[in-house]
Image (cartoon, coloured by chain):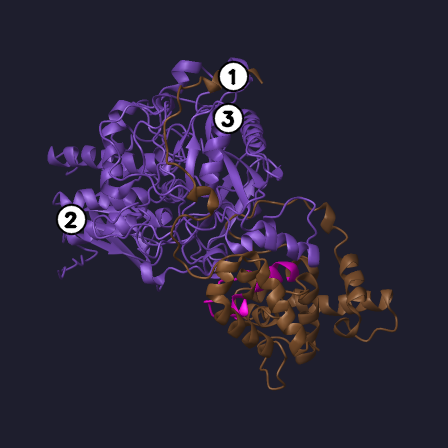
Chain colours: A purple, B brown
Amino acid sequence: MKIDLPRFKTSDVVDFVIVGSGAAGGILAKELSTNGFSVVVLEQGPYLHEKDFSHDEIKVLQEDLLTNHPKLQPNTFRKTPQDKAKPQRALVYGRAVGGTSNHFTANFWRFHEIDFKERSKIGQVAGSTLADWPISYADLEPYYTKVEWQVGVSGLAGASPFDPPRSKPYPMPPLPVKSNGVIFERAARKLGWNPFPAPMAILSQPRAGRSACVNCGFCLAFGCEVGAKSSSLASMIPLAERSGKCEIRPNSYVHKIEIDDRGRASGAVYFDEKKNVHLQRAKAVILSANGAETPRLLLLSASSKFPNGLANSSGYVGKNLMFNTGAVSVGVFEEQTNDYKGYAVSRILHDFYELDAQKVGFYGGGGLDARFDLTPIGFGIGGLPPGTPRWGKDFKAALAHNWTRTFEIFGHGTSLPVENNSFSVDPDVKDAWGLPALRLTYKDHPDDLKLAHWLAARSMELLDAANAKQKWTFPIDEQQFGVHLLGTCRMGDDPKTSVINSDHQTHDVKNLFLCDGSSLVTSGRGQPTMTIMALAFRASDRIIALAKRGELSA
Amino acid sequence: MITELDRRKFLSRGMAALGATWTAAHWPAVVAAAEHAHHSALFPEDQKWEFFTPAEAKEIAALASCIIPSDGTPGAREAGVVYFIDRALVTFAIDDQKTYRQGLPEIQKRLHELFPEAASFSTVTPEQQETVLASLDEAGAKIAPRRPRGNFRPSPAAQPLFEVLRVHTIAGFLIDPETDRKGNRGGVGWALIGREPGHSFQPPFSAIDRDYPGWHPATSVTAATKDADKK
């Protein structure tokens, strides 16, 4: 079928301009365009296709084929607002049509009920702005199901005794078990824990014209050449384009939201590939630019009407950033497991999802998975046990022996929101377009570090129970770098302590919506993309309802 | 000089580690690839270097070979690591040119401190080479391993040549051989670590998942959290 892709003029007042085409932007584009609205998606990165993806570790990991460019887009970092930030790479995000969903590992855990109302249950946590969501798990449940069926998630309903209620089973069975999954499952059961098949946003069966997983082993950081990984690019963008109402405009770097005399959003100002500036006019604007670029864009859009940044009357734009806590322990086994074959994770457990703070002495919770997400070069550089010679014949012998016998237990957990942890704009450093660079301020809440150590201890117990010949935990330090960019324009009912309401509408600008990792109020237990996608489906419904009631027009 | 006999020996020894079935299936390709790599590793006089001078290339090849030696199985030399690094320094690692240009004379200096009679790193005995490398890697034993994450570019801060060269040697040995990076010639790096060639696999992935009976719920749900909390 030949599709006539619409091309809008920048002077056309389209119904919606969406900034960003990732996990949230792709879904919003599909939902709004298939409901009859005209949509222009402005994506700062290129429009790559499956044929452009590569297993070249240099091209992907060093030349940033799919991600933000540290040279063109420098970052700075500081631990506290009292420090002067220094140039340092602070984050990685997807910079191509499909966004970060192109290169994620595809762990798709739903949040549980507790994630939405933890503040009420445990009370205030010192040093944290922990808050309840204005919506509940039940509000989001239909949209989790929508993600599973429309975007494509493989899994086994009812396999975990800790799973929240669901209205429908998964549309596909779990992917084939990996050897590390078998070992993980046996060891966890020995310890009395409850391992189960991991829900993954990877097709275990052909579906909607997409191939099932071919087990190439290059998930984390890489794009999927066969469309089995359920990125926005593979699942949603084609449907948006097929609607005939949506234009995906790549290489379009938005740096300002245009505001009219009445204080309403009237379009987005962007650089094209040649750095020419354009204004795309629209009736309403949606930012899905990720938890770093969405707040940066609001701060860059400061004006006399909005001196602290657009939609920032709360002062919370960019704040309460959460990266998720993580700890990685590694085991080397006697038998070959060949875990380089296949997707990353086949078994997980949620026994520690909700720890009792009174008993463990800190707030938090998380999950464990078994994985081998290292690619050959990364493994050669940093995947051998501590104390292994770093060169020479013994180094080489360890490389030869360990590659097929190594896997990791990854502990994923909560990050507490801390007001000072933030993305803001650097006063000195500029990007290649002359715009202020992203500045990261971050210092883990002490409870997050305690949780990381606690999860690592469970991982080491598990490796013991699995008879690992060697085992170690990578050092647990305060984080200075993130990939989960959460909480920076949080949702809430009170305009004083939140940036958007439960319809994703900014409290300050009626026709400006934010939907991406920045919307999250809590961090979940380490796998946020499923929830970002569910929020995007829900936001689409809310925005369509508002538009149909005429509440977005003048 | 590697003789024909030595080469046959290293091929057969190296393959023994890989398992009979895999070896049988891939033997002709592996032999052809290794012969190609061997030939290419011999520094043809007309080799056009993109960054190195021929003399520098010889030194880098010797250093890389010390990091991943050819000790019965193919190493950095057979994988053509020096060609990978030569191209790297005019492409993705262009920022490291200075490190190489300034670092090589320093290594030469270290060589002379340790062995005043020596002409160059590439012409001393393997034992002497190892002594030099060990002296350059004094800090190495103390470096705690970091989890490789995304970008593995050596830190932008000034690094001694040894650290950069170690990373580049590993990258040149283990890069996907289907790329045009000129590394991992003939796939010898992947063959050594036991990564089968190709980009599509089917389960079972090993004997462990082959014998897996399928997922079944545990007989009873344990309140594991409570137990774990006591620890």
**Within the image, what quadrant is residue A496 found in?**
top left
Q: Are marks 1 and 2 in contact (CB under 8 Å)?
A: no
User: For the residue labelled by badge 1, is the local secondary structure a helix, a strand or a loop?
Assistant: helix
Amino acid type shown at disc 2: Ser
Measured along the vertical axis of the image, is residue A403 above or below residue A294? Answer: below
**Residue A24 shown left or right of residue B85 in the figure:** left
Q: Are marks 2 and 3 in contact (CB under 8 Å)?
A: no
User: For the residue labelled by badge 2, is the local secondary structure a helix, a strand or a loop?
Assistant: loop
The chain carrying label 2 is A
Which tag is nearer the camera, tag 2 or tag 3? 3
Dot 2, how many residues are within 10 Å of its Cα: few (below 14), some (14-19), or many (20+)?
A: many
The magenta region covers B165-187
- Quadrant placement of the N terminus of chain B: bottom right
Specify whether disc 2 shares its chain with disc 3.
yes
**Residue B174 shown left or right of residue A164 in the figure:** right
Q: Is residue A375 visible?
A: yes
Q: Does the magenta run of residues contain B47?
A: no
Q: Nearer the viewer, residue A159 or A420?
A: A159
Q: Position of residue B34 (x, y in %)?
A: 56, 72
What label does residue A38 carry, if any? 2
**Within the image, what quadrant is residue A32 found in?**
top left
The residue that mark 3 highlights is: A190
